[in-house]
Image (cartoon, rainbow, N blue to C red):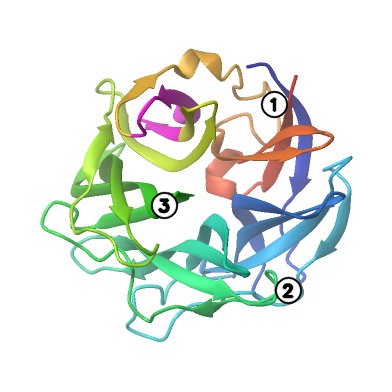
Amino acid sequence: MIWKKLGLVYVANGQKDWAISHAYIPTSMMLDEERIRVYVAFLDSHKVGRIGFVDLEAKNPLQILKVSDQPVLDIGQPGTFDDNGVTPICLLKYQDNLYLYYVGWQLGVKVRYFLLMGLAISKDNGESFQRYSQVPILERSDRELFVRSAAYVHREEDYWKMWYIAGDQWINVNGKQVPTYNIRYVESDDGVTWGKQGVVCLELANDDEYGFGRPFVTKEDNLYKMWYSIRTIRRGYRIGYAESLDGQNWLRQDQKVSLDVSKTGWDSQMIHCSCIQKTKYGTYMFYNGNNYGETGFGVAILQ
């Protein structure tokens, strides 16, 4: 896979009090053949994220058509699992509605934060979303204590598949406490009710890796393809790739990505949180760059 970088698409410019900075975890869908909508989390002055969108030309995804004036999903009520931020992860159309799976951020005391999975549903084609529940659809379990989120959901025949990140430990990396986690798999009958314990399907490869981020899965000719972010001690985030015949047993083939950091600029330190969008003009990859989306999101095209 040869990806050609097209450039930086968008970063918040501080003109809205709820969108001072960032454009975190691009999550796209086609509005029609000529327009792409990319949902992202914009951060306020307290680094609390709310979900908005950026509409782009499908022919030229560097051309911005519209940016949301208000959040399509705000933070939750005080004390709930998403009271300190919401981040988009996966979009799925089902029965004339749009399902938005998102990460809820809640601050901790003995640990820095908790990340759990929420669901919001849109009945107006993504102009606004309403929470399915005030509690997460992926709640904590004995082996997934602190992180159970960042899911990609795929509906297949009469059941639903989910790949997500989960972990139950914190480690010290360069003087900072961070969670460590891997990618797991679980199924559902309705896309809402999921098992308490997932099956580990992608493990860390070496001591430099301590976590994965944002799996994104496609299925082509009975082959599952997964893009994901690899969190490393020495190099920060990089994008990885794996393939599977059954969705549970994966062969890592990170060398196939052929997309790395630039020599200078907005994505010169890390690249991560990739999202694949097929259009009639080509297949795009939207992704974040330096400092976890602080420099915005950019786009590459598959050659």
Residue type highlighted by circle 3: Ala
Please report the bounds of the magenta region as a residue range: 229-247
Question: Which disc, if any, is residue 264?
Answer: 1
Please say whether residue 224 is visible from this viewpoint. Answer: yes
Which mark lies nearer to you, 3 or 1? 3
Residue at the image position 19 percent from the left and 59 percent from the top: 196
Q: Vertically, is 240 above or below 91?
A: above
Identify the residue shown where x is 46% and y is 35%. 229
In this view, the residue farthest toward the front is 157
Q: CA distance from mark 3 to mark 1?
A: 29 Å
Residue 176 visible within the image: no
> Marks 1 and 2, how far apart in space?
28 Å
Q: Secondary structure at mark 3?
A: strand
Tell me, yes or no, whether the highlighted magenta stretch contains residue 235.
yes
Front: mark 2 or 3: 3
Does 165 lie within the magenta span? no
